Image: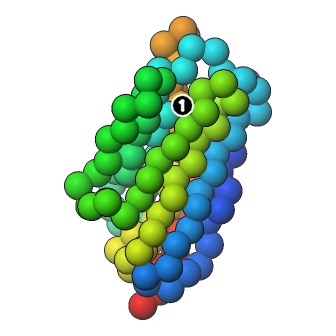
Amino acid sequence: QVELVESGGGLVRAGESLRLSCAASEVIVGIHVMRWHRQAPGKERELVASISNGGTTNYGDFVKGRFTISGDTAKSTVSLQMNNLKVEDTAVYYCSIYTWKYGVEYWGKGTLVTVSS
């Protein structure tokens, strides 16, 4: 069973930066898209950013140029560089990788990002 493990979360102050990383326990064949999601306390999970196997990226409107997603399908890794963090970015961040080959989306267990004012 493939596992995704996120790392890089932590406690930072507003305006600071964090880089989240996600790695799979084994190389995933046929990656179609890799994503970062987040879920804040009391709120539904939302999509933060995605990157396709062709390198096309998409971001949630709330990102507004502050975050950058990058990925390596050959290594089955995906990262999220977050700059100018805001208090409202506080959430558990999850990565996911969807493979068209098996029609499966793998999920990590999440990493907590806390932004203080």
Q: Which quarter shows the N terminus?
A: top right
SS assignment at label 1: strand
- Depth check: 68 or 49 in front? 68
Q: State how many labels appear.
A: 1
Quarter location, residue 112: bottom right
Q: Position of residue 61 (x, y in %)?
A: 23, 55
Q: Residues within 10 Å of mark 1 (few under 14, many from 20)?
A: many
Q: Residue furthest right?
A: 25
Scheme of image coloration: rainbow
93 vs 78: above or below: below
Q: Residue at x 27, y 61 (%)?
A: 64
Q: Residue furthest left?
A: 61
Q: Which quarter shows the C terminus?
A: bottom left
Tell me: 15 left or right of 72: left
Q: Position of residue 29 (x, y in %)?
A: 63, 15
Q: Residue furthest top?
A: 101
Quarter location, residue 84: bottom left
Q: Residue at x 43, y 82 (%)?
A: 15
Q: Position of residue 85 (x, y in %)?
A: 42, 74
Q: Residue at x 66, y 24 (%)?
A: 74
Q: Answer yes or no: is residue 77 visible.
A: yes
Q: What residue is disc 1 on? A: 97
Q: Position of residue 63 (x, y in %)?
A: 31, 60
Name the kind of residue labelled 1 in the image.
Ile
66 vs 108: above or below: below
Q: Residue furthest bottom?
A: 117
Q: Answer yes or no: is residue 41 visible.
A: no
Tell me: 48 left or right of 22: left
Q: Residue at x 41, y 58 (%)?
A: 67
116 vs 54: above or below: below
